[in-house]
Amino acid sequence: MSGLPTAPERRGYGISGVHRPGIPGPYSITRPFHRYRNNTGGSGGPGFFKEGIALPVTLWRFVDGKAGHDAQSRGLVTALQEQLAVDVFDIPVEKAGSGFRSWLTARYDPGRELPAPDLLLGAGHATHWHLLAARRHRGGRAVVLMKPTLPLACFDLCLVPEHDGRFTAANVLTTRGVLNAITPGGAHDAGTGLVLLGGPSRHYRWDDEGILSQLGRLLQQRPVKRWMLGTSPRTPASLLQALDDRYGMEITPWESAPQDWLADSLATAGEAWVSEDSVSMVYEALTAGARVGLLQVPRRRANRVTDGIDALVQDQWVAAPGSLQPLAGPQQPLNEAQRCADWIRVHWLTNH
């Protein structure tokens, strides 16, 4: 693998520079860059990094337009902003090829007017070369939120879900599932239930009647007065029609759901029932702190995704698929974004 970039060696835990004189600050940046800021500094408060670099942290977030990838990086950004003052700039990424060319030339034009980054975040394969090109040109630490297609050593930190394998490299932090943008907490009304449905996938077959049968028994057995139901792009239209005909549930199709519908619904529901194929929604429900049960979906074969679901059952995070009896719920929500933000803050952004 000679010739591929590797994360540069650094002494101590300090990070590279912040705003440079003569470079426009975050207030003067215009579209397509989007700016966030935590003015309070969160629990970290005002202060300095180990090498005397002042807050706020400058973070470049590379976005590929995919909702799932966006949620992963937003979750980490939000968790960081709860602890530190962070200026965030979104850089749209359409394809990986332009990033590779930028890396070859050691010039990254999309960020030429931005303050130099301290952190660079990316989720999705299209972001990989952009992360490396930006780091080569402007510095900072590159964090990839997945098992990358490039060697792990190319990045300063890889946040890899455990279902993608376990690695012993010092720059890998294994996570339980993918990160998400759900905030733990909420009322979790015992009289309100939430159903989240996926659909056919390469790992799962789909059975409309099987899902309908489980929902019928669920409505009979659970002491819930109000039921909400959300779908995903994979949910068959045939199932929605049958649901509308048979059950009096508040159905919110994914294409018409308000932006914060899922987060608000998870904060309200006392229990959440997720079809086991919808892995990301399973972890979002766990992060919210709801009691979580699984609706059984026929599996095509055993694989890393189904193994991850089985591990959640074994560790008593969720009830077994099809059992229709949720567990008491975890004592603490599964907040992996916060854990990763803690690691970054402790190892890179605070005094020791």
Image (cartoon, helix red, strand yellow):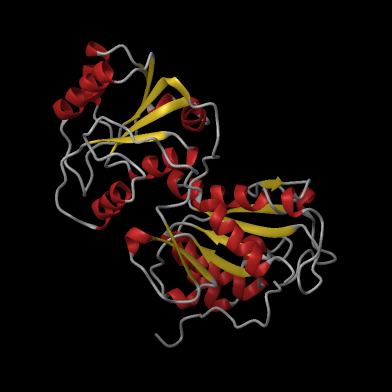
Question: Which of the image's four quarters has the C terminus?
Answer: bottom right
Which of 143 and 84 lies nearest the eye of the viewer?
84
Count the labels in the image.
Answer: 0
Q: Residue at x 17, y 36 (%)?
A: 206
Q: Residue at x 21, y 57 (%)?
A: 303
Quarter of the figure with residue 256: top left
The image position of residue 144, as x and y in percent, is 50, 63
Which of 326 and 232 lies nearest the eye of the viewer?
326
Indicate whether 231 appears above or below 316: above
Indicate whether 198 appears above or below 21: above
- In the image, 121: left or right of 228? right
The image position of residue 213, as x and y in percent, is 17, 23
Quarter of the figure with residue 150: bottom left
The image position of residue 192, as x and y in percent, is 42, 20
Indicate whether 224 appears above or below 110: above
Question: Which of the image's four quarters has the N terminus?
Answer: bottom left
Indicate whether 125 appears above or below 326: below
The image position of residue 197, as x and y in percent, is 31, 32
Quarter of the figure with residue 176: bottom left
Which of 48 and 260 lies nearest the eye of the viewer?
48
- In the image, 76: left or right of 235? right
Q: Residue at x 80, y 65 (%)?
A: 48
Find the residue positioned furthest to the right.
21
